[in-house]
Image (tube, helix red, strand yellow):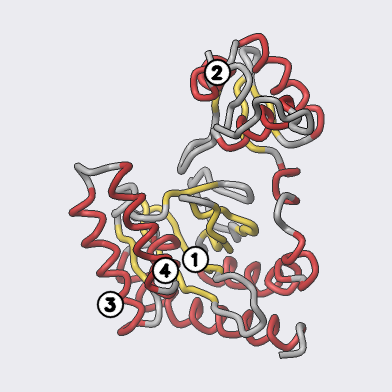
Amino acid sequence: MTDENPDNQPTSGDRHFVTALARGLAILKCFRSGEELLGNQELALRCDLPKSTITRLTYTLAKLGYLHKTGQQPRYRLGMKTLTLGGTTLARLNVKQISQSLMRLLSEETESLISLGIRDDMSMHYIESYRGNALITLNLGIGSRIPIAPTAMGKAYLAVVDAAERRTLEDRIRSFDTFSWPRLKQGIEQGRQDFLTLGCVRSFGDWHKEINGLAVPLSFSNGLPVMVLSSAGPASHMTADRLMRQVKPKLLATAAEIVRRVDADSGS
């Protein structure tokens, strides 16, 4: 087992390198796109570390709030504390606070799951989420990570980033899943066309056949990274027709208002 170097860092002879810290960060990186719960054995295999070492690390990370433990045979999901990692810019400009009331109102008006997300490596990471009053069965919320390629949120992100970043991400997506790549590539291209013609991006059963969604990229004028606002729900409730006729105009208006308020807050 690679006991000294969980993230392929040049640690030999480096007395400043803290192995325990590197191992803890490696555990947090194990929670891949769309995954909710992982056990110690799965984490041990992914980190190539002894299960006893992983058990101590997950216990510590859970105590600190970076992991959340569930069940008697412990399985873990990312904890709320992980939202503080890399969140300095978001906190400084109050993006979440500015968006909250608008998202809450939109979720109530559309009876859908309204989420605000950013890209985190090969996932879209929910940093804010509201369910409204509807009986929405989607097991997604703040802290959830969803894959980029098949989701409305991910395709909306890819629709507006610069060509170099998009090519890099597409190359990585293709390397991860060569079998599905032709279908995923078609969806990405459709997302770019959606954004040009509709102002938003659709995903009707592309990720999970029972989930429909729309997403709008948020491009700010103050140096913030691209974020994405999405509306999603069970296909039986949020039909494609309902999303396009009833939800789309409200989603676009809310996205524009969030951008306006954030830009104004930062003095742009």
Q: Characterize the local packing of mark 1: few (<14), some (14-19) or many (20 or more) Cα atoms within 10 angstroms.
A: many
Which structural element holds mark 4? helix
The residue at which mark 3 appears reads as 193
Say the numbered circle drawn on residue 230.
Answer: 1
The residue at which mark 2 appears reads as 2
Which structural element holds mark 2? loop
Q: Residue 189 location in percent, x, y? A: 26, 68
CA gap, disc 3 to disc 2? 45 Å
For discs 1 and 4, the disc positioned in front in the rendered view: 4
Mark 3 vs 2: CB contact within 8 A: no
Q: Earlier in the sequence, mark 1 or mark 2?
A: 2
Say the numbered circle drawn on residue 156.
Answer: 4
Q: Earlier in the sequence, mark 3 or mark 2?
A: 2
Between 156 and 71, the one nearer to me in the picture: 156
* Image quadrant where one finds the C terminus: bottom right
Mark 3 vs 1: CB contact within 8 A: no
Q: Residue 178 location in percent, x, y? A: 23, 44
223 horizontally vs 41: left or right: right
